[in-house]
Image: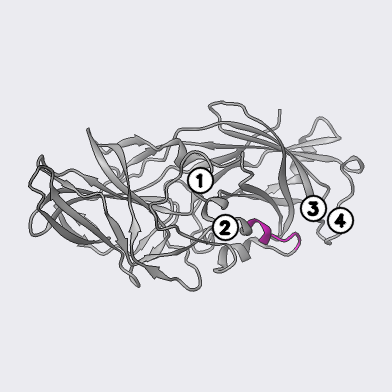
């Protein structure tokens, strides 16, 4: 039976003061100094919230917490960008960190910045983060004022890509974090000016920005009976080595709705596959039991074109070290058996396989659920 997990993510807090380093008007002329124009103040709070419960969620499903490392945006390492687009979806300004005040709060990461003068009335704000963790720092330099459009970012399959490490990569709560992307709805600057009390500084409320991680997570839980266990050297074959940092919002119009997220994978122009992606071990509560869980973060994949394979070994846990190897396709399972071909591996989703017993075949419980989304909330400035 297919079920879902509510994934609760713990928030972490950090306060940043931001100033702008560059901007462009609709006619692509340089912006005048802030002292010669009204100031629009942007207050950005990046938080983490509980995942929405799907209507298909069965009674008794697991509720668990992610690690801080899975939630983290590497603000200290300047591993993020806040991008402002006009009503045409054209990049008109980029915020850069200039100073940081670390403040532990329950609300999350907080960012304040000043928007330079622009003739645009309709704007959107996008946040991209943790590219350096995947050796993709150059992605930040590929956002060009006046020339980069949101539509380019969504359909470009070469410019904003990353290569997945195959050595059991995992976020560590320090310099390594999961790449994420989110974008606000359209906001009207004219609404801010009409509602302003201070006519020299206008405060923007863009609502919340839902952030999606650029990877999926495959988990293999050791639920075997006493006397046997999973060997730790689990690997994934036929996986996509290259992923896209930014999801295709055109193909996934409901990507920022927490109970929907993405339904189609966002793939590079030339997907390449490889074998030998290593899993890492962690201890988690699965149901009511504490289990050893072997996990791997993976890029999105079209499984109708390339079927990923989990390679694992079941062995005796005593002195008699007999073992048997298994090659398990990444599919849906029910009553211990494969029942349906999965069409894709999707970002920000967890695919969990509980290995219950092993003989000629494996007895497997299967669960898929969306991970809770990180949220960048832009409230009224106070």
Q: Secondary structure at mark 3?
A: strand
The mark that comes first in sequence, 1 or 4, is 4
At a point 89% along the width and 49% down the height, the residue shown is 32
Q: Nearer the viewer, residue 98 or 26?
A: 98
Q: Magenta segment, which residues?
A: 140-146
Q: CA distance from mark 2 to mark 1?
A: 12 Å
Q: Position of residue 181 (x, y in %)?
A: 55, 51
Q: Position of residue 1 (x, y in %)?
A: 20, 50
Q: CA distance from mark 4 to mark 2?
A: 29 Å
Q: CA distance from mark 3 to mark 1?
A: 30 Å
| Disc 2 target residue | 136
**Circle number at residue 176:** 1
Coloring basis for residues = one colour
**Circle number at residue 33:** none
The mark that comes first in sequence, 3 or 1, is 3
Check residue 339 for magenta coloring. Answer: no
Would you say the residues marked 3 and 4 are in contact, meaning their CB atoms lie under 8 Å apart? yes
**Circle number at residue 23:** 3
Q: Nearer the viewer, residue 77 or 50?
A: 77
The mark that comes first in sequence, 4 or 2, is 4
Would you say the residues marked 3 and 1 are in contact, meaning their CB atoms lie under 8 Å apart? no
**Circle number at residue 30:** 4
Counting the numbered discs, the total is 4
Q: Position of residue 244 (x, y in %)?
A: 51, 61
Q: Secondary structure at mark 4?
A: loop
Q: Position of residue 380 (x, y in %)?
A: 68, 33
């Amino acid at each position: 039976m297919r079920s879902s997990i509510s994934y609760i993510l713990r928030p972490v807090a950090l306060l940043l003061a931001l100033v702008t380093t560059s901007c462009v008007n609709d006619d692509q002329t340089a912006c005048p100094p802030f002292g010669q124009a009204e100031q629009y103040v942007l207050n950005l709070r990046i938080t983490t919230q509980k995942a929405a419960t799907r209507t298909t969620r069965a009674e008794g499903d697991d509720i668990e917490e992610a690690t801080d490392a899975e939630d983290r945006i590497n603000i200290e390492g300047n591993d993020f960008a806040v991008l402002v687009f006009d009503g045409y979806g054209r990049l008109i300004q980029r915020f850069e960190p200039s100073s940081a005040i670390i403040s532990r709060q329950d609300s999350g990461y907080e960012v304040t910045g000043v928007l330079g003068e622009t003739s645009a009335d309709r704007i959107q704000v996008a946040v991209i983060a943790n590219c350096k963790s995947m050796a993709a720092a150059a992605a930040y330099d590929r956002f060009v004022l006046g020339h980069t459009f949101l539509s380019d970012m969504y359909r470009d399959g070469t410019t904003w890509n990353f290569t997945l490490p195959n050595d059991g990569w995992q976020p560590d709560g320090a310099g390594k974090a999961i790449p994420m992307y989110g974008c606000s709805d359209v906001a009207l600057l004219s609404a801010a000016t009409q509602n302003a009390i201070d006519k020299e500084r206008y405060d923007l409320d863009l609502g919340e920005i839902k952030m999606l991680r650029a990877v999926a997570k495959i988990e293999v839980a050791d639920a075997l009976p006493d006397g046997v266990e999973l060997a730790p050297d689990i690997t994934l074959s036929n996986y996509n080595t290259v992923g896209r940092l930014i999801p295709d919002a055109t193909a996934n119009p409901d990507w920022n709705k927490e109970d929907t997220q993405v339904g189609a994978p966002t793939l590079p122009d030339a997907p390449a596959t490889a074998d030998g992606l290593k899993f890492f071990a962690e201890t988690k509560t699965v149901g009511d039991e504490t289990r050893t869980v072997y996990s791997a973060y993976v890029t999105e994949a079209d499984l109708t074109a390339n079927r990923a394979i989990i390679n694992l070994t079941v062995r005796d846990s005593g002195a008699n070290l007999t073992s048997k190897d298994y090659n398990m396709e990444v599919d849906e399972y029910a009553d211990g058996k494969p029942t349906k071909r999965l069409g894709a591996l999707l970002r920000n989703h967890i695919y969990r396989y509980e290995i219950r017993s092993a003989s000629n075949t494996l007895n497997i419980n299967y669960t898929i659920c969306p991970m809770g989304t990180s949220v960048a909330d832009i409230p009224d400035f106070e």
